[in-house]
Amino acid sequence: MNFAKWGAAALALGMLHVAAPAEAAGGKTLEAVKARGTLNCTGHDGSYLGFAEVDDKGNWKGMDIDLCRAVTTAVLGDPAKLKIVPISWAQRWPSLQSGDIDIIIKASGGTLSRDTELGLQFTNSYYLGTTKVMAHKELNVASLKDADGGSICIPAGTSQEQQVAAYTAKLGIKLEPVLIEKTEELEQAYFSGRCDMYAQWGPTLAIARKAKGKVEDHIILPDVLDVEPEVMIVRQGDDNWVDIANWTLSALLFAEQSGITSKNVDELKAKPTSPQIGKFLGATPGVGTGLGLSDDWAYSVIKNVGNYGEIFERNLGKESPYQMDRELTNLWNNGGVLFPLVFD
């Protein structure tokens, strides 16, 4: 045989293999969710204002809930196929590991121990928050170093416990921790005066203070105990599932960056302004194949849930009771740190 011709033929076959589109992927979790027909996502054992709120009729809303809806829509095409499972902070990990829930979207930070000791896997960050401390104004505490000997409410079973311990050790002060798991009970303990201070994720403190209508009576201290990237969390070993979560987040960010909203998405799908937009919205094929999803999954997400900016504004921002600014949780081209992966 002519080895030169054989080598050329082998190279050509190799190039064809590289150029061929990937087969439809399908990890274990995706297969299980499709077979079940519902996606099980985390709620809260009560309400976590702005992120996971439930009314007396069992209706859920919030930033995290809408992200659960976005992933559900990407996979099953319909946000109504989401099942919210109310769980506490401590129940997050065993509920995921047992298969009772498919994904954790519950204001949860990506940490080394959660990755290496608990066998968890993280997406890119969907919210960058700081851990801060709120104090009763009447105590005249200007910063945490002035609070030596005071008591501090901390959510039990969260990374804030370690953050408070590390920060107070650095300052050389001692505080009496009051650990309570349920957010409503924790806030009741602080606002009733049981605790001098309240350590929490910064957005939660701002929301709680405003929700109680007592903005003037409480100050959020300037100390920043830590910066925590909030992530969606899945089980290790299912790369397809974490890919789906990551690309769903990127779809929300890419849509905002590109000016695609729930109101104009139909128009842009019918008349794409670029080949990239056409593929993103499923007007031309390819965006779903490698993930094991339909080619209109991103279109369905934006149509049903909106882009990232729409989600933020209705749950936390100017359309919500909390009137929060985006700050770092904004797009890279608007003063923030968020950015989408590239849809090519």
Image (tube, rainbow, N blue to C red):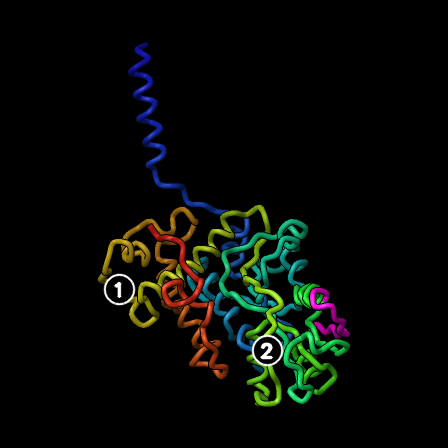
Q: Which residue is mark 2?
A: 205
Magenta run includes residue 172? yes
Q: Residues within 10 Å of mark 1 (few under 14, many from 20)?
A: some
Q: Position of residue 122 (x, y in %)?
A: 55, 54
| Mark 1 or mark 2, earlier in chain | 2
Tell me, yes or no, whether the two marked residues, 1 and 2, touch with CB atoms within 8 Å. no
Q: Is residue 238 above or below residue 14?
A: below
Task: Let me know if residue 31 appears in the view.
Answer: yes
SS type, badge 2: helix
60 horizontally vs 303: left or right: right
Residue at the spot of label 1: 268
Q: Residue 319: name its quadrant.
A: bottom left
> Which span of residues is magenta-colored?
169-181
Q: Residues within 10 Å of mark 2 (few under 14, many from 20)?
A: many
Residue at the image point whose x is 37% and y is 59% from the top:
298
Front in this rendered view, residue 78 or 117: 117
Seen at 51% across and 75% down, the residue is 61
Q: Is residue 146 above or below residue 119?
A: below
Please give left or right for residue 148 compared with residue 286 in the image. Answer: right
Asked which quadrant contains residue 53, the reply is bottom right
Residue 68, percent from left and from top: 51, 65
**Amino acid residing under circle 2:** Leu
Query: Which amino acid type is shown beneath numbered disc 1?
Result: Leu
The percent position of residue 25, horizontal first and vertical second, equals: 45, 45
